[in-house]
């Protein structure tokens, strides 16, 4: 699905100049890894064949406003200005239940946490992503898993969606903003996630095939193009 030319043109001026590839920050000197998690038995799903991958991007102001999703994800660094940050890279099956916590895993090393911090500013979330998702595909180590996630994330050029006027902020406008700064993507490869029961933008997810090439998201692309959304503001309004 390619979005109509007029929908794409409507947001180019607002979002594509200038754009940037990844958040820039300085990890705090006190940054330390989080302890390994102990998943509940009902969280463990293994033996599911991987059918595709999802790169999930948090709209961090909304994440911070609502406290994240799940106890392991609540400690996002919210005292710094962030827009989109990397939630994680997820191996998914053809249908639910999706693989999770497939193998036992220990705590991440400090170097990996520091290298990923400016993309995912939460040691607890990094630990969760490795245990819950990184152990469910053919990555031999946390370094290999986060290296793949970082490569996909850094390849994206993140649009400045806060430049979209509030009255024009629809799922179509957000998709168009990503298409304007990422010519390799198509509209049906961009999944828009809103908070359940509201129109608040929470995540943008990019779907990939087993060779990490963008692909249409199985089961649809989330919020319909015509949905009007709200956007939690960042600290600086520069995202």
Image (tube, helix red, strand yellow):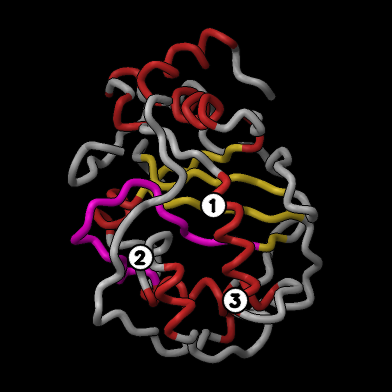
Residue where numbered disc 2 is placed: 121
Report which quarter residue 93 is drawn in. Answer: bottom right
Q: Check residue 81 for magenta coloring.
A: yes
* Mark 2 Cα shell of 10 Å, populated few (<14), some (14-19), many (≥20): many
Task: Report the number of discs.
Answer: 3
Q: Quadrant of the N terminus?
A: top right
Who's the residue at 71% across and 80% down the image? Answer: 140
Is the Cβ of the residue at disc 3 closer than 8 Å to that at disc 1?
A: no
Task: Indicate left or right for 51 with 15 as reference.
Answer: right
Report which quarter residue 105 is drawn in. Answer: bottom right
Who's the residue at 52% across and 24% down the image? Answer: 180
Secondary structure under tag 1 reads: helix
Q: Which residues are magenta?
A: 73-90
Could you say where residue 235 lies in the image, as x and y percent from the top left?
Answer: 18, 46
Report which quarter residue 151 is drawn in. Answer: bottom right
Is the Cβ of the residue at disc 2 closer than 8 Å to that at disc 3?
A: no
Earlier residue among tags 2 and 1: 2
Earlier residue among tags 3 and 1: 3
Could you say where residue 50 lies in the image, as x and y percent from the top left?
Answer: 77, 63
Spatial CA distance of label 2 from label 3 is 17 Å
Residue where numbered disc 3 is placed: 143
Residue where numbered disc 1 is placed: 153
- Seen from the viewer's position, the closer of residues 157 and 84 is 157
- Seen from the viewer's position, the closer of residues 172 and 149 is 149
Spatial CA distance of label 3 from label 1 is 15 Å
Secondary structure under tag 2 reads: loop
Spatial CA distance of label 2 from label 1 is 14 Å
Q: Check residue 116 for magenta coloring.
A: no
Q: Quadrant of the C terminus?
A: top left
């Amino acid at each position: 699905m390619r979005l109509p030319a007029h929908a794409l043109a409507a947001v180019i001026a607002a979002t594509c100049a200038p754009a940037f590839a990844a958040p820039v920050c300085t990890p705090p000197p006190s940054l330390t890894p989080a302890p390994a998690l102990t998943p509940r038995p009902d969280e463990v799903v293994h033996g599911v064949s991987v059918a595709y991958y999802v790169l999930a991007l948090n709209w961090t102001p909304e994440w911070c406003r609502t406290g994240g999703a799940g106890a392991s994800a609540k400690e996002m660094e919210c005292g710094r200005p962030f827009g989109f940050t990397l939630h994680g890279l997820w191996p998914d099956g053809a249908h639910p239940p999706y693989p999770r916590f497939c193998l036992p895993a220990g705590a991440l090393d400090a170097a990996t946490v520091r290298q990923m911090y400016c993309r995912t500013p939460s040691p607890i979330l990094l630990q969760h992503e490795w245990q819950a998702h990184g152990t469910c595909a053919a990555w031999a180590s946390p370094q290999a898993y986060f290296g793949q996630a970082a490569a996909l994330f850094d390849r994206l050029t993140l649009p400045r969606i806060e430049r979209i006027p509030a009255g024009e902020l629809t799922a179509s406008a957000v998709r168009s903003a990503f298409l304007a700064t990422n010519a390799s993507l198509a509209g049906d490869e961009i999944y828009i996630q809103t908070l359940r029961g509201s129109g608040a933008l929470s995540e943008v997810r990019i779907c990939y095939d087993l060779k990490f090439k963008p692909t249409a998201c199985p089961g649809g692309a989330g919020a319909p193009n015509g949905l009007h959304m709200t956007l939690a503001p960042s600290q600086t309004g520069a995202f």
